Image: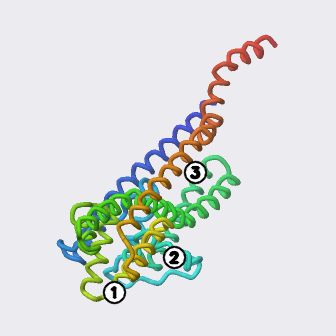
Amino acid sequence: METAMIILGITNASIAGTALGYWGLAKHEEQRIARAYRLQAGADQHTRIDQRILEVRGVYRSVLLQAIKNSLPADEARKPVGKFWLLRADALTEMLPKAGLAGSVNLEGCGRTRRNLALGGALGGLAIGALFSEMLAGILCVAGFILGFQALHAALKQEIEARASVVEQELSQLIEVLVLGLRSGLSFDRSLEFYCQYFSGGLSRLCALLQTQWNHGLITREEGLRTLAESYDSSLLERIMESIIRALRFGTSLAETLSNAGAEIRATRKTKLEERVAKAPVKMLIPIGTLILPAMLILILGPVLLELISGF
């Protein structure tokens, strides 16, 4: 019993130390990546690294930081990663723009990140499992490899979902500013410029960038609005951008169209919040059933079982 408790304490201490060291390494890498971007783009054009990845946090954020680091140009030539680490590359290519990382992460960086996380997870599982048995070491090694290989895909998926949720919140502000500007006699471009000037966020920064491009003739306004819709995995944003394009093309009342779109956004957000609230009690059953209930049963029935055992 004492030996098992000692092994358990050593394992917990190792896991805690590994987690703390990984957190410190992630913060150091974040600062290093930010310095690298400043050197590449210049101080005026530099965007802080925490603004490049705004929404996702925790382990997923560390995974994305590793992908950004592995995508930076190296001082010396790197060997290309094998084809195995680039499996489902088409899915990654589709996910990177919607995660806002198309200009920061490339496929080579994704392959290196997969390789490092998969091998690191395999070694970590092997080391932890070796403390108990060879069979457990093999099982945890395989499980760690699979989890590490899938970590980047899961991090991108979480980032896409988080950005879509945030953009729908910022979209209501955009529509309100556009409606006020249009009803005040301003043009669409001028109203959008006011929004980009007085509001901060991922949507306003992207709108300002795309508006600058179509003002200089690099792209058309329709292309810019469609690019804005494709940068997020939000069907609501896509419908609103298409409505704006049609209104500008055919000369219909854009203010009325945006007012109806604003009402639709508020109704959609209310419905989603009600769904999340309704799912909360169901999700609470998992920690209650796996953590709280067994501990209460042991606390209540433990003394009774001990008395029964001592009686026999």
Q: Amino acid at mark 3?
A: Ile
View extreme (left): residue? 44
Label 2 with label 3: CB-CB less than 8 Å:
no
**What is the secondary structure assignment of the residue under circle 3?**
helix
User: Looking at this rendering, what residue extends furthest in the top direction?
Assistant: 311
Mark sitting earlier along the chain (1/3): 3
Residue depicted at 25% across the width and 83% down the height: 215
C-alpha distance separating marks 1 and 3: 54 Å
284 vs 223, left or right, is right
| Tag 1–tag 2 contact (CB < 8 Å) | no
Q: CA distance from mark 1 to mark 2?
A: 21 Å
Considering only vertical position in the picture, is 272 above or below 249?
A: above
Residue placed under numbered mark 3 in the picture: 128
| Quadrant, the C terminus | top right
Q: Mark 2 or mark 3: which comes first in sequence?
A: 2
Q: Which residue is at the far bottom? A: 217
Is residue 143 found left or right of 80 in the rendered image? right
- For residue 141, which numbered disc appears in the image? none
Q: Residue 291: x percent and y percent?
A: 61, 34
The residue located at (37%, 85%) in the rendering is 77
Name the amino acid type tagged 2: Glu
**Which residue carries the number 2 mark?**
94
- Report x, y in % for residue 153: 53, 67
For disc 1, the marked residue is: 219
Instruction: Tell me if residue 229 can be seen.
Output: no
Q: Please tell me in which quadrant of the rendered image residue 22 appears.
A: bottom left
Amino acid carrying mark 1 in the image: Ile
Q: Is residue 194 left or right of residue 288?
A: left
Which badge, 1 or 2, is on the more N-terminal residue?
Answer: 2
User: Which corner quadrant of the image does residue 250 belong to?
Assistant: bottom left
- Check disc 2 and report its element: helix, strand or loop: helix
